[in-house]
Structure formats: structure tokens, C-alpha cells
Image: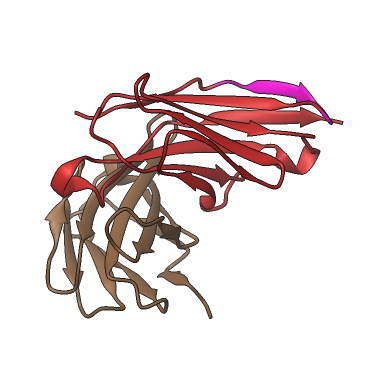
Chain colours: A red, B brown
Amino acid sequence: QKEVEQNSGPLSVPEGAIASLNCTYSDRGSQSFFWYRQYSGKSPELIMFIYSNGDKEDGRFTAQLNKASQYVSLLIRDSQPSDSATYLCAVTGSGGSNYKLTFGKGTLLTVNP
Amino acid sequence: NAGVTQTPKFQVLKTGQSMTLQCAQDMNHNSMYWYRQDPGMGLRLIYYSASEGTTDKGEVPNGYNVSRLNKREFSLRLESAAPSQTSVYFCASSQGGDSPLHFGNGTRLTVT
């Protein structure tokens, strides 16, 4: 069973700080990695995806991928109270299962004003 | 452009009753998925359809059946509901391959 592990949190940061969310995965053949944000009672919404080793930046968000360490992270700069949500890491399967996403259980982030 | 539409939003069933959850997407996506989300368990894949005319089991398929009616629609059926199927159900679609998923708003199902 392919696994995606996240610290469940809660992670609490003050407004304006950098929030760092981490994720590890077990399938060494995984090629695509996604971060979703889910507000309480709502559906997951895509924040970022990353396919290559290194960093990918989009506004206040930076995704970092290290395939050798099987590790992917999400940094949120200048955190805002509206960023308070559960963040889900998702990883595709390898080979013929590349369209099957496995999700971590999520990290609850709280940004305090 | 509605994206992924799920119906109903809420449903209460008695043990043994059957029902079908409906899902439709208007993004011309090839692949569609059904997930369930339970506290402490995260999102788990029930069934998926990589393309029109194909369906396959995910991580937790027992007690469910699916139908890919056409490219737009993918339904999930509970033939004999059990309390263990109390959950929030999400339908999602994607262009296919390793493209991102787009989720519907979910169906909150309670089985008593």
C-alpha cells in the first residue's frame, strides 16, 4: 500500500510568519505531487503542483520537491488568517497507476492574527 | 461553467436502503473519481474511471458500484447502505494522466 505521510498538526503560526508544511511518500516511482487546501466543510482546492526536483513558486506559495529523499514541502510566506485550513499532500502512483492520487491525512494550519 | 457538480448535498439513509450519488463535469475531462473522506482517515479512493467506458477499483470499493454513463457523468451506487458508509463523498475529475484533480462540493451521507 502506497503511503503519504503528513504531520497532522495543528501547526500554529502568527500572522506574517512563514508556515512550513511537510510530506513524505513511499512510492519511489511517483512523478507528480500536489498540494490542496481544504477549508472546514468545503471541498479540496488545488494550490500547487510540482513535477521536478527543486522549488516552484506561485505568489506567496513555494513547493519544494526532493525525489531522492521522497519529500515534498509547501511554504506559505506572509501567512494570513485566511490561510487557516487543512493542507493535503497528494502523490500520483507510478507506472500505469499514474492517474491515481493518494492523499495524506492533511495538516491543520492555524494562522493567528 | 459549473465545474464538477454533485447531487445530493446531504442524505440520510437507514441501514439496508440503496441510493445513487450523481456526479457530472463540464470540463471535458477524461478521468473521473469517487473519494470518501472520514475524520482521521483522509481522502480514500473508492472507484475511478480513467476514460469513458472504463472503471476500476480504488482503495475501498467494497459496498459500492459505479457507472460511467458518458464522458460527463459518473455515478456511485450504494446497494445496501451500512453505518460504516457514513462519510463525506467527493467526486473529482481530471484531464487524465497525472493532471490535477478538480473536486465537486461533496455529499454528506449519514446511515443510521
Left or right, A59 with respect to A89, comes to: right
Please say whether residue B62 is visible from this viewpoint.
no
Asked whether the viewer can see residue B110, the reply is yes
Residue at x 33% of width, y 71% of height: B22
Is residue B50 placed above or below B26 in the rendered structure? above
The quadrant in which residue B78 appears is bottom left
**In the rendered view, does A70 fall on the left or right side of A59?**
left
Residue A21, image x, y percentages = 57, 26
| Residue at (44% x, 60% y) in the render | B102
Horizontal and vertical percent for residue B97? 27, 57
x 80%, y 34%: residue: A78
User: Would you say A76 lies left or right of A74 here?
Assistant: right
**In this view of the protein, which residue sits in the foreground, A98 or B93?**
A98
In the foreground, B12 or A82: A82
For residue A103, side relative to residue A83 (left or right): left
Q: Which residues are magenta?
A: A9-16
